[in-house]
Amino acid sequence: MTGLLTDFRRIRELLALSRWRMTISIGWGVLALGSGLGLAALAAWLIARAWQMPPVLDLSIAVVTVRALGISRGLCRYLERLATHDVALRATSTARTTTYRALAGADIWRPRRGTTFGVDEPPTAGSGAGDAARHGDPTQLRRGDLLGRVMGDIDDLGAVVVRAFVPIAVAVILALFAVGLLLPISVPAAAILAASLVVAGVIAPWLSALAAREAELAVRSDRTEFTAAALTVLDHAPELRVAGRLDAALSTATVAGQRAVAAEDRAASRSAWAAAATPLSIGVSVLGSLLIGIVLYGTGPAVTTLGFQTVEPGGISPMALTVMVLLPLSAFEAVAVLPAAAQALTNGRAALRRINRLEQGESESPRMDLVKLPEGNRIAVTGPSGAGKTTLLMAWAGLFDTPRPGVTFFAEDAHIFGTTVLENLRVARGDITSDEAVRALRAVGAGPWLDALPDGVDTELIGGAAAVSGGQRRRILLARALLSPARVLLLDEPTEHLEAEAGTDLLRRLLDESSGLVAPGRIVVVVTHQLPADHRADALVRVAADGHSSVERFIPA
């Protein structure tokens, strides 16, 4: 309970909720559902009273009031939606501004290691491979987590206002009002209504919150572990097969997927019970009121109490019986939305925890220990997938603080534009000529592919990357790197998806300063999983799975 209240306060502070605006939203919500509740009670009284065929003037005020309540219900609902969404949109805008400011000063832009498992250490059941998405490298934090937390998580907090705070406050007020309205007619019926409202308004939301938490854990843990394991198999199936670990990796993915499905089924079961609680509570309340009304109906002398013709001792009139039976049908309208409110609140609290960690600059993993580029003109970087090799290159390029002049990072997933081959190479340098482009493409082994193009380097790659194979794409990106004016080339997996022999030969030439592929005065840093044994690199950086790095230097023969 203490944690829940703390989260309430933190959400209110982060969203900078205006108490006055929230009060207005709650007030319109109470008027909207209160109109419905009053309409149900008054309409029931009017129907029963009309059955007694009194003078028309005795019913005129009730008729006009019923019409007024019918109109005010829709009008107040519209005004409540306007007021509530105004509060929510203002709050999310404020929260984004606050989060952006916190991010600007947070210590999350420095490289940190990841713990995603790869070829050198494939995931095993129970190994924690599902932590990959939660403990990924900063590139994943910046591209995925950061966008998700600033956009999706803050939207979840805004939804708490619309789907949780206001509906919960309105439900509490209307539930008390409904029980109080029924109390003068029959204490037992009011008690049954109160108990049914507790079931629908407390137990059902609790089950719904459990379902939401179960679903969140399934997605965050089991489903994430399945995704990580499946990607490991898809990305490194040949290496895993050679190492004799493919079956184990497939088994890990299968087990993780089964756990995710089982967790989602448990969450769906709790959601089903939560959804069933409200109609069951309505049925119990109406049936209980009806049975009590049958027992009490028509006994004792007629007495008028609070506008209802009741019968003493303990009896009730036809109007009171009708109100007592029909009132619960409208009373549950306020609590029917509480299971969804509980889910929204659970999601909002989870979003709040993620935003808090992000704003405080917390990291789930320690920083890498190698921040300076080793000496040498040809440097190879190796290590298991997810150890932080790409992050290391990005750090050397200054992408986490200030970009370094003359140092360019070439990502393995760099974009191929839907334009000519020549224009795709001019991304690196705008004055590249056709002859330079042809020489660079032939140097990286793309000559046969280039000869097969109808217009050579002027051929349009319609669809961008979809117009070329994975190997052709890598050769284009490598040619782009060779043509760039940068003195230091940081290449991320430049030979991935190439044929084994061709990729090894190209990697060997990249790491050999005398090969002529790259000018001797330039520095080349290559991240690779397939370092040739006879490479000519000046230094080898080994990045361990725990993020620690070591440098091995080579003395030319």
Image: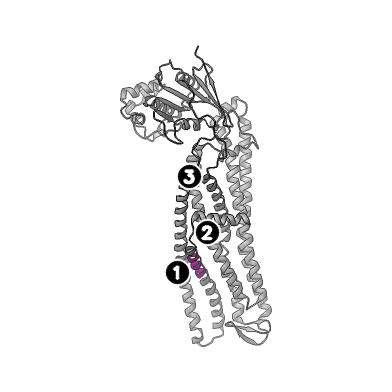
For label 2, the SS is helix
Mark closest to the chain's N terminus, 2 or 1: 1
Question: Mainly helix, strand or loop, the magenta region?
Answer: helix
Q: Which residues are magenta?
A: 23-32
Image quadrant assignment for residue 383: top right
Residue at coordinates 45% horizontally, 18% vertically from top-left? 509
Q: Residues within 10 Å of mark 2 (few under 14, many from 20)?
A: many
The residue pinned by badge 3 equals 103
Q: Nearer the viewer, residue 393 or 78?
A: 393
Q: Nearer the viewer, residue 285 or 126?
A: 126
Indicate left or right for 62 with 191 as reference: left
Indicate left or right for 297 with 149 as reference: right
Amino acid under disc 3: Leu
What is the residue that sits farthest to the front in this orientation?
105
* Residue 434 position (above or below residue 515): below
The residue pinned by badge 2 equals 163
Q: Give the Cα distance between marks 2 and 1.
A: 19 Å
Horizontal and vertical percent position of residue 544: 58, 28
The residue pinned by badge 1 equals 75
Count of numbered marks: 3
Residue 354 seen in the current view: yes
Horizontal and vertical percent position of residue 268: 61, 52
Q: Residues within 10 Å of mark 1 (few under 14, many from 20)?
A: some
